[in-house]
Image: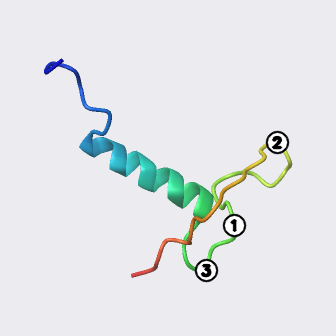
């Protein structure tokens, strides 16, 4: 059991942050800014606040 890789790895945080930016956007952006508005994607999210600007 000691040789199993843990479920959370440090690199996973970067992936989660990137997905949160794609879905939640950032201050001043439109909702779901990284997905097309042509109806080919249906994006649902719950409780994601826009990423704060620095």
Looking at the rendered image, the quarter that the C terminus falls into is bottom left
Instruction: Count the marks.
Output: 3
Query: In this rendering, would 54 be left or right of 3?
Result: right
Nearest the viewer among 20 and 34 is 20
Residue under the point 29% across and 43% down? 11
Q: Residue furthest left?
A: 2
Q: Which residue is mark 1?
A: 31
Q: Secondary structure at mark 3?
A: loop
The disc at residue 40 is 2
Residue under the point 57% across and 56% down? 22
Q: Secondary structure at mark 1?
A: loop
The disc at residue 23 is none
Mark 2: few/some/many CA within 10 Å (<14, 14-19, 20+): few
- The alpha-carbon separation of the residues under discs 3 and 2 comes to 24 Å
Nearest the viewer among 12 and 40 is 12
Residue under the point 82% across and 42% down? 40
- The alpha-carbon separation of the residues under discs 1 and 2 comes to 16 Å
**Horizontal and vertical percent for residue 15?**
41, 46
Task: Kindly indicate the quadrant of the structure image that contains residue 5.
Answer: top left
**Horizontal and vertical percent for residue 19?**
52, 51
Q: Residue furthest front?
A: 1
Q: Secondary structure at mark 2?
A: loop
Q: Which residue is mark 3?
A: 28
Query: In this rendering, would 21 be left or right of 33?
Result: left
Query: In this rendering, would 5 be left or right of 52?
Result: left
């Amino acid at each position: 059991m000691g040789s199993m890789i843990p479920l959370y790895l440090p690199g996973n945080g970067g992936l989660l942050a990137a997905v949160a930016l794609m879905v939640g956007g950032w201050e001043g952006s439109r909702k779901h800014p990284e997905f097309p508005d042509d109806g080919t994607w249906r994006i649902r999210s719950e409780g994601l606040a826009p990423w704060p600007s620095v």
